[in-house]
Amino acid sequence: MWEQIETVASRKEITQALTYIVDLAGPADDDADAAWRTELVKRYHTVRPFLPLLCKVIRFGATPAGHRVLAALRDLPRLWGGGRNKVGVEEIDQDLLIGSWRRLVLQAPDLEPGSVDWRAWTFCVPEQFHRHLRHRDIFATNSSKWGDPRAKLLGGAAWTTAKPMVLASLGLPDAPDEHLAQRAELLHATYLDVVGRLPGNAAASFDDEGRLHLAALPAEADPPSLVELRRLTNRMLPRVDLPEVLLEVFSWTGADAAFTSITGGETRLTDLGVTIAALLVVEACNITRRPVVKSNVEALTRDRLAHVDAHYLRLDTIRAANAALIEAQAGIDLAQLWGGGHVASVDGMRFVVPVRTIHSGSNPRYWPRGRGSRGATWLNMINDQAAGLGAKVVAGTPRDSLYVLDVLYDRDGGTKPQMIVTETASYSDIVFGLLSLAGWTYALQLADLPDQKLWRVDQKADYGPFNQAARGRVDLARVSRHWEDILRVIASIHTGAVRAHDVIRMLSRDGHPTQLGEAVANYGRIHKSLHVLRTADDPGYRKTMKGQGNLQEGRHSLGREIFHGKRGELRQRYYEGMEDQLGALGLVLNAIVLFNTRYLDAAIAELRAGGHEVRDEDAVRLSPFVRHHINMLGRYSFLLPTDLVGRLRPLRDPNTVDTDEEDESG
């Protein structure tokens, strides 16, 4: 081995390099946290009254990985008892001393031989406790948020009963060997097929280090017929106020009937839909109630708005109303031209949260430091028919990948999509594995494709230019050993017994997968490699991903314009308030999309009836997110024409141009 190494660098050069690295890294018992940990030790008297109560008030449990930390926390009061001022080395668990804590606890100034700095130990243990609590190695037994996710996994008789049904639903076998062999053969054959087509693939190339590069998809030019169609349809859309959009959509779908009283009684309120529309405008536009209050209209008085807000407008009624809009959208010819509802994307819309709340977090990538440096993420899903299928508010900015499965499994309505498009922030090998096990095609838009490691099963196979990129080995034996537990995990998610993000946290620790997590990740690496190979080989696949990603961006752009009040900042302090307000935004977005889609479809029909040629390839590129014809500012109209029962508004003359109108390209 040294002969091979010395063809690149001499032993002297390697020794010098290692010495340099050690000098840069510093002593093994030091780290970047040493300074603040030293200062923390001085605050011992601040935490001593609190820590003894922690384990008395809250009942904690632990996995095998967390037992020693929890035992050390419970043992702290004993070390302080009896007026002691000396703690021996043999009384603490030295394996819990990580980084600079080892020096601070064992080598503090003026320590007697064989003793430790018990003040430093008092802070070392809670830090370890917090780390294990976040990863659920320690859990609060009676907590829904901080409880043990393993306790909710299917087991015993429940697992025995559910197993046949779940495996049949997901198409997974009880015994893994044949299934894994088929996956391995599919990966091998895909490598060979893609390699065979590389000479004719102008988009794919490899650099000197064997990294895969893909040329960007060329921009699709707008033909004159599409430009003309956009111009005509934009002029034909009727001008309306935002509340009128909601009221008209309610008249088509009956979605306002989903807003039932929290008491369960039948409502006696007249014009409830008008009040609901007003409150949705207030929440979605992030404004006060003043612009919608009309003291001479019973449905819009302050008292009526306050009563309906308290008793009718809540997340479950918003979701029920949204299901009606999703169903209506799927029945429009133009929406069916856009897609069949089988492709969807999940992405986050970020909001600054300027108020003090535990449900926001800081991230310089999204929110610069200073005022408004904390925020929350609205992780939402949209299908290829432009309908928002569901969403989840994520406090702070953890990786979106923790919550993608929760959004997928908690749809408001619509056809279950088969292909899920996300951006890189939603990526991990574990998520690839879980999504693949759950039956979805995970189409990840990889921004750093050249840096992606591909994986193979057969280390001896020759994959030509992919040999360097495909340097990872999938350990099928590991997957096979953990197959029963893998099935139990995915079945627990599939049946709703446990939240997916809790399971994903359970499968990793300190950024590294557990043994079970590594098994799931190995399964996911097969499908990740298949995805990258298909991305390199199939321009149509890449175009589908890009188109769906652009659709999601268009929805977020419209959402920003709607959510214009208070500088677009989310100022709810409580998680439920965030969910309700952003749920209202999602419902209003779907209402505008449904309104636009139906009127665009009617405009196309009228143009064709008038002899104008409208090609399907042009119609499919019309945007449901046009907004020039909708007033979202100022005081609003809540009046619908009396002759609209069962009919649409008359379309405007496409040959008439308003002086203040700007055509939108969508």
Image (spheres, rainbow, N blue to C red):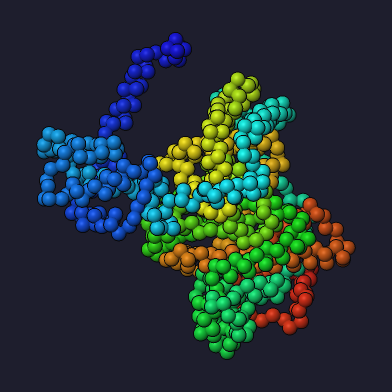
Picture residue at 59% right of the left edge, 45% below the top: 435
Looking at the image, which residue is at 54% across and 50% down? 157
Give the vertical position of 297 relative to 440 (above or below). Answer: below
Where 114 falls versus 320 (above or below)?
above
- Viewer-proximal residue among 518 and 103: 518
In the image, farthest residue toward the top: 3
In the image, residue 229 lies at what x, y percent? 77, 59
Quadrant (top left/top right/bottom left/bottom right) for the C terminus = bottom right
Residue in the image at 85% along x and 58% along y: 613
Could one spot residue 589 in this view of the protein?
yes
Q: Nearer the viewer, residue 375 or 503?
A: 503
Front residue of this view, candidates 413 and 486: 486
Q: Is residue 215 visible?
A: no
Q: Answer with left or right where residue 613 lies relative to residue 645.
A: right
Would residue 39 be found to the left or right of residue 456 on screen? Answer: left
Horizontally, residue 65 falls left or right of residue 582, namely left
Q: Quadrant of the N terminus?
A: top left
Tell me which corner region of the image, top left, top right, bottom left or bottom right, holds residue 9: top left
